[in-house]
Each structure stands twice: as structure tokens, then as C-alpha cells.
Image (spheres, rainbow, N blue to C red):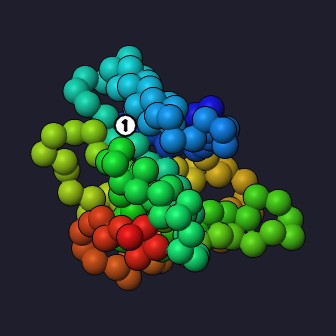
Amino acid sequence: MATIQYIEALGAAFLGYLVVAREARGAGVGSSLARRAFQEVLRAHRAVRRGRPLGAFGELEHLHGRSRFHRRRLRFWARLGMRPLQIAWRYPRLEPGTRPSAMYLAFKPMRPGQVPLTRERMSSIVRGIYAEIYPQPRARKVLRRVLLSIEKGPARIDFRDMPEEAR
């Protein structure tokens, strides 16, 4: 199963989930689902705009530990062109009593000669993702923390090296 949501205001998409049954892993099912989801981004974008979409964003877990499974998961996303961005992304608290989780916001560019992700553009993208994906009022505090990390960061947002646990 894969879920992807095109965010028209951003000209980009957000990949919410990609889940493959344990017994089907390693057979190319996840790659096929992800490629199909990215094709849907192109289709959705072309229905409302010309050209190519900015790309697809998604969340990757901070995988603590060095298990083979964790390393394989990060390498899987890297092979699909999805790389963590240099921002302090947080998955908001979605239920009372839970805490926000540190995650990687990953990005798969879909335009040739990709437009740089400046601090201002990244702030706008983050606001758009939170408005569409996490509209709950309790997510606002986490959104402010993410935006503050962008403001204090470099003027241009680049990709991180793949986390050490992926090696």
C-alpha cells in the first residue's frame, strides 16, 4: 500500500505511507509502489499545471541502531532518489499524550535543473505540508519549531549525507 497526496499550492506531493507485507519484501513490490506513486504525482500535477512538479516529500524515521533492516530501509529510499534534507523535521504529536518524533524530511526532485530550496522556499513548503497533512491545532507548536530550525539554518537547504545508520 502507498499513499501520496498532491499539494497543489506547492506543486509537489507528500508520500504518507509505503507499506509492504513482510513476506513480500525484497521482491520489488515497494519499488513498484513508489514508482507508481511518483507517476501519480506527475499525473496530478499535469492535470492542473504545465511542466513537471517540484517533487515528492516524505518522512523517514530516525533509525537508531544498526540493524540490517534499518540500513536496507534507508538505502531503499536513496535508490528511489529520496534523500533527507538538512532541516530539523518533527512528526507532530497526533494524539494527546504522545510526543513529537524526530524524523528526516526527505525529498525526491522531479524537475531537471532543480530550483534551489532556499530558506524562504523551504519555510513555505513546510507550511504547506503542515496545512495539508497536519492541520490539527496541536501541530502548530511543532511547526513553529521546524520553521525556527530553518530560519537558523543555512540560506540554501541541501541534502544530508545519508545517515550513518544507512551505511
Q: Quadrant of residue 54?
A: top left
Left or right: residue 84 versus residue 161 is right
The residue depicted at 26 percent of the width and 31 percent of the height is 52
In the picture as drawn, the residue positioned furthest to the top comes out as: 47
Q: Mark 1 is on which residue type?
A: Gly
Name the spot of residue 156 as percent of width and height, x first.
24, 69
Of 139 and 92, which appears nearest the observer?
92
Instruction: Give the quadrant of the N terminus.
Output: top right
Q: Quadrant of residue 39?
A: top left
* Above or below for 86 versus 40: below
In the picture as drawn, the residue positioned furthest to the left comes out as: 113
Instruction: Give the quadrant of the C terminus.
Output: bottom left
Name the spot of residue 161 as percent of width and height, x first.
31, 70
Badge 1: how crowded within 10 Å, few (<14), some, or many (20+)?
A: many
Left or right: residue 132 versus residue 75 is right
Q: Secondary structure at mark 1?
A: loop
Name the spot of residue 122 as percent of width and height, x first.
36, 60
The residue depicted at 42 percent of the width and 51 percent of the height is 77
The residue depicted at 19 percent of the width and 48 percent of the height is 114
Residue at image mark 1: 11
Name the spot of residue 55 as percent of width and height, x first.
34, 42
| Whether residue 71 can be seen here | yes
